[in-house]
Image (tube, rainbow, N blue to C red):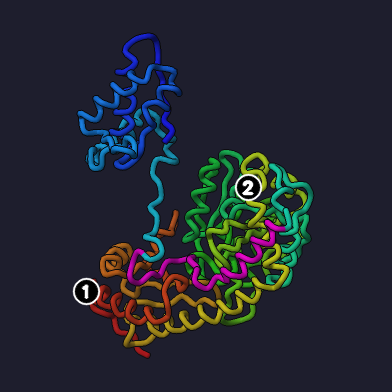
Amino acid sequence: MDLHFTLTGSGDLTAQIYAQLRAAVLDGRLTGGDRVPATRDLATTLDVARGTVTAAYDRLIAEELLESRRGAGTFVAAGCVPPAHATGRRARAGAVRPVPLWATPTAPAPGPGRTAYDFSVGVPDDSLFPLATWRRLVSGTLRRGRLTAGTYEARGTSRLEVEIARYAGLSRSVVAAGDDVVTTAGAQQALDLVARVLVEPGDVVAVEDPGYTAAARLFATHRAVVRGVPVDGEGIVVDALPPAARLVYVTPSHQHPTGVAMSRARRIALLEWAVRHGAVIVEDDYDSEFRFADRPLEPLQSLDRDGRVVYVGSFSKSLLPSLRVGYAIAPATLTAALREAKRVTVWDGDTVTQGALADFLAEGHHAAHVKRATKVYRARREALLAGLTSPGGLADWLEVIPSAAGLHLCTLLRDPVLDDVSIAEAALAAGVFVEPLSVRHLEQAPHHGLAFGVGGIPLERIGPALAALRQVLSASRPARRVDG
């Protein structure tokens, strides 16, 4: 293993080598079983006598921090440092602190496989991903030498951007050409680029409340004044928008987290409001490719006649979050700025993944995968709905918010005394992960409920999961009987 040593002056060089190697062991940079350089090699590297290094090693061997193995070399002794002691380097990391905005990180969800019954929101089933097809396309991208075409800066419109424009036009009625598309590392980076080119410190950004808290937090990092606007059964309440809002972030196809679809009348009202107030609408269409009822409404982007909408999407829900491919489809007046903002932050991303995804779209694999996955998710969704709405299930505690698309359902607690965070914590202790609704509120008085994702839980586990949750709810408060 290569180690960095700094020898200064003509003092006791053995003591300096000893102290630096000892520190590497104690602070965890070297752990039990790691091999250290041979004395001859280290002496040559440091331009010192071999005996100088040997004396330092002998001292560490005497302290049982190193051990010599005949014919094999010198190694860090196993178990020579208690686990807690190995964190000393972190404890000394000291005086520098982030600005208050970053001081409190958001607590992550338990993650796939961490609980017996996982209703995580926004998580697709990775077992459905056509891995064999994807491997073939990645290999084909490499064989064709496209990697050699990758530079820090892309030139012109990429194949993927052309295919995304075609895909969004066919599947979602988005009006776009390849030149209108800016590929990104997921939808979150698309939002970041939009904020970079549109939001100045102190600008007001309106978000749905309850809503996607990661987006609200992102806008806040750009020093925007983030305002929460209430949501009803038709989507964001346009009349409640702050007049000074420079940007309005919405999820109209499947509102996050309630699941309601923005009505056509509300969409028209929002577009008219944006024109009157000179605002930009960011339309995040995060999982509406999975539809289970009703015909999809036209996206805001296709209804927009004034160049006020930036349409954001990704392949995180339809394929895999780990692919990290998203996109922004913007008015022509913004695309150059978005591309420049991308250039100065992350350049052009992973050209191999982008090339494989372009082929995946062009050859029809994405459409076929969504069709297959929708059947699986539909079965899970129907089982979940049955358990949530039947009188013998959870209907006495929970009211389902109507939803026609997406990978999750949201419910409201019927009893106003119940606290959704406490219920979610008790459910987690019982092996069931559900997300409380109240934590998604920003300014509005919180509604208490639970959100259930269908991507992370197999069909056969939904019944037992709801049975376990029923026990948690029963222990929290007796059921309030619902007729019918």
Residue pushed farthest bottom?
484
Identify which residue is drawn at 61% across, 72% down. 289
In primary-sequence order, the first of circles 2 and 1 is 2
Compared across the picture, whether 476 is left or right of 182 comes to left
The secondary element bearing badge 1 is classed as helix
Indicate which label's residue lies in the foreground, 2 or 1. 2
Across and down, in percent, residue 214 comes to 49, 53
* Image quarter of residue 31: top left
State whether residue 70 is above or below residue 313: above
In what quadrant of the picture does the C terminus appear?
bottom left
Residue 449 lies in the magenta-colored region? no
Residue 29 appears in the rendering: no
What is the crowding at mark 2: few (fewer than 14 residues within 10 Å), some, or many (at least 20)?
many
Q: Which mark is residue 193?
A: 2
The residue shown at (43%, 58%) is 441
Callout 1 amino acid: Ala
Q: Which residues are magenta?
A: 114-143
| Image quarter of residue 30 | top left
Q: Secondary structure at mark 2?
A: helix
Q: CA distance from mark 2 to mark 1?
A: 47 Å
Q: Residue 372 in the image: state x and y as whole percent.
A: 58, 79
- Please tell me which residue is depicted at 40% across the width and 60% down the height of the picture: 445
